[in-house]
Image (cartoon, helix red, strand yellow):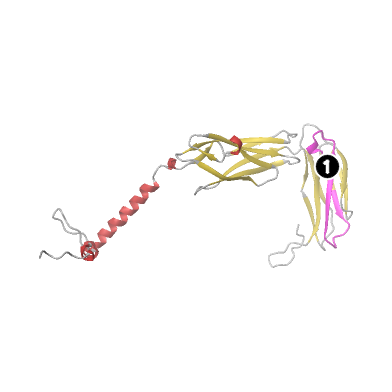
């Protein structure tokens, strides 16, 4: 009979022996097991590095001409649309899973009737539509795009500077409950190329007395407010109307509050906290 065939287990390479030495086809000395393992780890790292260095263009992505828009608006502008043009780069389509604007004054839309899946090379636009209403001053609003797959969200930002022609500061006056009922004042400033005059002033809470003073008629005013007492919590709204020709600037409002004093570092009320 011929020689007996070895079993499948016997035919497998014996790793301990192979790891302990490496055949030297050039007559050199065999390498140690530690050297072999070191080389295997090195090959793994090199392979990972090559994978990470692969061109990112293989992935699909929306490349925007700009991701931030800055604008200064005229004082009477009520509506506004801003556009963020984009191009699809890479070799695979991109799908927009969700797009949103976290503000009632801003709505977002995408060109081609809200098309969500875009092929490489295609161009489109993300549009933001503003209804500004009575909004004034400097504002910053964002549109956030979320994508299918392992792609980070993308944020498109609009920064608007809306002239505040009739500004009142501070927005709120505070008094501490049980504290001193001393007088405080609002300052009103006209930021326009023509004077704006106060035509009416009112308050929603009789606990707060107020007096309008003309510092520079048509340009600067003060409103001195004095609470009758601060024995209980209170809230009031002060409204000033004027003769500005622009409707959104024809009034301004501010608030008065009697509140529980802020706690200090030790938990005790801070004297004179405001």
Horizontal arrangement in the rendering, residue 229 relative to residue 32 (left or right): right
In the image, residue 209 above or below residue 74: below
Residue 232 in the magenta stretch? The answer is: yes
- Report x, y in % for residue 44: 33, 54
Query: Residue 139: x percent and y percent?
Result: 68, 42
Residue at the top extreme, as displayed:
193
Residue 217 occupies quadrant:
top right
Q: Residue at x 73, y 37 (%)?
A: 163
> Is 93 left, or right, of 4 in this rendering?
right
Residue 157 belongs to magenta span: no
Residue at 77% across / 48% down in the picture?
171
Hey, which quadrant is residue 4 in on the image? bottom left
The range drawn in magenta is 224-251
Q: Quadrant of the N terminus?
A: bottom left
- Where does label 1 land, which residue? 221
Q: Is residue 274 left or right of residue 106?
A: right
- The residue most toward the left is 1
């Amino acid at each position: 009979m011929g020689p007996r065939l070895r079993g499948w287990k016997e035919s497998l390479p014996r790793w301990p022996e192979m790891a302990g030495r490496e055949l030297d086809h050039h007559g050199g000395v065999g390498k140690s097991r530690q050297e072999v393992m070191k080389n295997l780890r090195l090959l793994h790292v090199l392979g990972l590095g090559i994978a990470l260095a692969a061109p990112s263009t293989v992935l699909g992505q929306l490349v925007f001409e700009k991701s931030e828009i800055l604008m200064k608006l005229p004082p009477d502008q009520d509506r506004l649309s801003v556009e963020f043009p984009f191009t699809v780069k890479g070799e695979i389509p991109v799908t927009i899973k969700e797009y949103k604007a976290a503000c009632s004054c801003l709505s977002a839309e995408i060109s081609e009737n809200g098309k969500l899946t875009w092929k490489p090379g295609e161009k489109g636009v993300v549009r933001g539509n503003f209804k500004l209403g009575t909004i004034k001053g400097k504002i910053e609003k964002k549109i956030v795009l979320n994508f299918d797959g392992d792609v980070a969200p993308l944020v498109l930002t609009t920064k608007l500077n809306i002239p505040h022609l009739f500004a009142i500061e501070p927005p709120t006056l505070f008094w501490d409950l049980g504290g001193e009922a001393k007088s405080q004042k609002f300052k009103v400033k006209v930021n326009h190329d023509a004077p704006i005059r106060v035509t009416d002033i009112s308050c929603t809470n009789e606990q707060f007395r107020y007096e309008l003073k003309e510092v520079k008629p048509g340009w600067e005013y003060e409103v001195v407010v004095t609470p009758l007492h601060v024995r209980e919590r209170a809230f009031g709204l002060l409204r000033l109307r004027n003769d500005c020709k622009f409707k959104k600037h024809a009034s301004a409002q501010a608030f008065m509050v009697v509140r529980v004093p802020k706690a200090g570092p030790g938990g005790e009320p801070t004297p004179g906290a405001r």
